Amino acid sequence: MRNSENRCRLLVQSSPMCIHEIGMDGKISSMNRAGLDMMGLDEECKVQGFLDLDAVCDADRGRIGELLARAYSGESSNFEFMAAGPGELVFKSCFVPIRNKDGAH
């Protein structure tokens, strides 16, 4: 079990894509190195507690908020959004609900 957990942790941390976990309160609870680099941060603790939707521009926030609500109900989605802040950075992203062994999320 420990080997499996370590392997999964290494896969997430080694991914060139941003992988982060969002709690039921909409706040980021963890983020891998690629995500921290995208945000210009050096420590995970600096992103923990950050509202995920605060990274989305005002024009896209409602649409992405609806997709996040669906994710809380168990629905996955793929989408693009424009980031909040200077520049017009567009990101491809997805919401993938995490389920336990019984299928609950």
Image (spheres, rainbow, N blue to C red):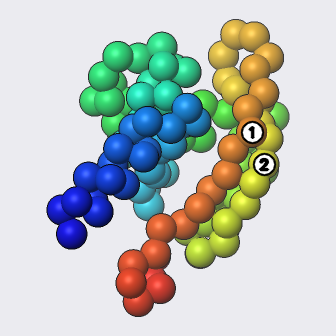
Q: Which mark is residue 102?
A: none
Helix, strand or loop status at disc 1: strand
The percent position of residue 47, horizontal first and vertical second, equals 38, 30
> The residue under label 2 is which amino acid type?
Phe
- The quarter of the image holding the N terminus is bottom left
Q: Which residue is mark 1?
A: 92
Q: Residue at x 28, y 30 (%)?
A: 45
Check the image and name the residue furthest to the top: 86
The percent position of residue 91, horizontal first and vertical second, equals 73, 32
Q: Earlier in the sequence, mark 1 or mark 2?
A: 2
Label 1 packing within 10 angstroms: few (<14), some (14-19), many (20+): few
| Left or right of 48, for residue 89 | right
Q: Which mark is residue 79?
A: 2
> The residue under label 1 is which amino acid type?
Lys
Check the image and name the residue furthest to the bottom: 102
| Left or right of 11, for residue 3 | left
Q: Residue at x 49, y 28 (%)?
A: 34
Q: Residue at x 70, y 10 (%)?
A: 86
